[in-house]
Amino acid sequence: KPLALTVKEGEEILNLCNDNGVGFICNHLRRFSPFYWNLSKFLNLTTVETSISCSYGGGVFNTGTHLLDTLNILSRLPLKITHAHSFDEISSTDFNVDFSLDLLPHVSCHIQSTKAPILEIKFTQATLQLILNLTYPFNSLPLCRFYSAEDNPIFPGGKQFSPQAIPPNLRYTTVNDHCFMKNAVNFIVEYLSDKFENSDLISYNGMESLKAINTLCHLKD
């Protein structure tokens, strides 16, 4: 990941795979976890007014590609850049940049680069707030923190976000549920044995991988 450094190179790779009957998986790890697809249904970004705030570091091609692919999973919408600034080159092929995305009129999305060890997305809706730790299980923090809007006990008539247990339909059980490479191998085995039942979890023709590259190349230009 990413699939390539340009859309043209990515298309050439995918065409070679498709022309020769080769199944393709890009190392966008979170596509191999059902949790993220369940979260997509839970947040319902297509109809619910939402503010999205993202933080990443280590280069937009190296780390930001995971952030963009996760946003693709959760929104299932094209990621159109509306504003980019604070360009910081960190190597000959990668850079950090702050930018905003246009998803839907009722969804705002801002991405902030940082030198801090953070890769996370915060979703804020009228009745809930959810902070998603994209580096799980590669650090000791929980996968997500969930808050719901409650009456403010100090300021009458006001509201506050208070921590809550993770809703049952988002609950994850063990770290093994997020052992991405093992999940990917299991999917490949099912695919090759014609027993694949998770068609909404992953794109074997690799076309989904082009979405992140397209966004990244617009930032580079």
Image (cartoon, rainbow, N blue to C red):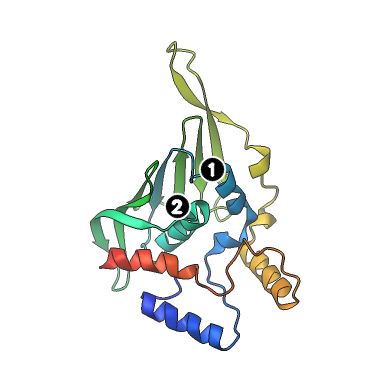
Q: In the structure shown, which secondary structural element does the residue marked by tag 2 occupy? A: loop
Kindly tell me whether residue 113 is visible in this rendering.
no
In this view, which residue lies farthest toward the bottom? 20
Above or below, 82 relative to 181: above
Q: Determine which of the numbered discs, if any, sits on residue 119 in the image.
A: 2
Please report whichever mark, 2 or 1, sits nearer to the chain's N-terminal start: 1
- Mark 2 is on which residue type? Leu
Where residue 101 sits: x, y (%)?
Answer: 35, 52
Q: Quadrant of the C terminus?
A: bottom left
Q: Determine which of the numbered discs, if any, sits on residue 105 in the image.
A: none
Above or below, 149 relative to 90: above
Q: Which residue carries the number 1 mark? A: 43
Residue drawn 47% across the image and 30% down it = 126
Where residue 168 sits: x, y (%)?
Answer: 68, 39
Where residue 62 sits: x, y (%)?
Answer: 41, 66
Where residue 23 sits: x, y (%)?
Answer: 60, 79
Residue drawn 62% across the image and 63% down it = 180
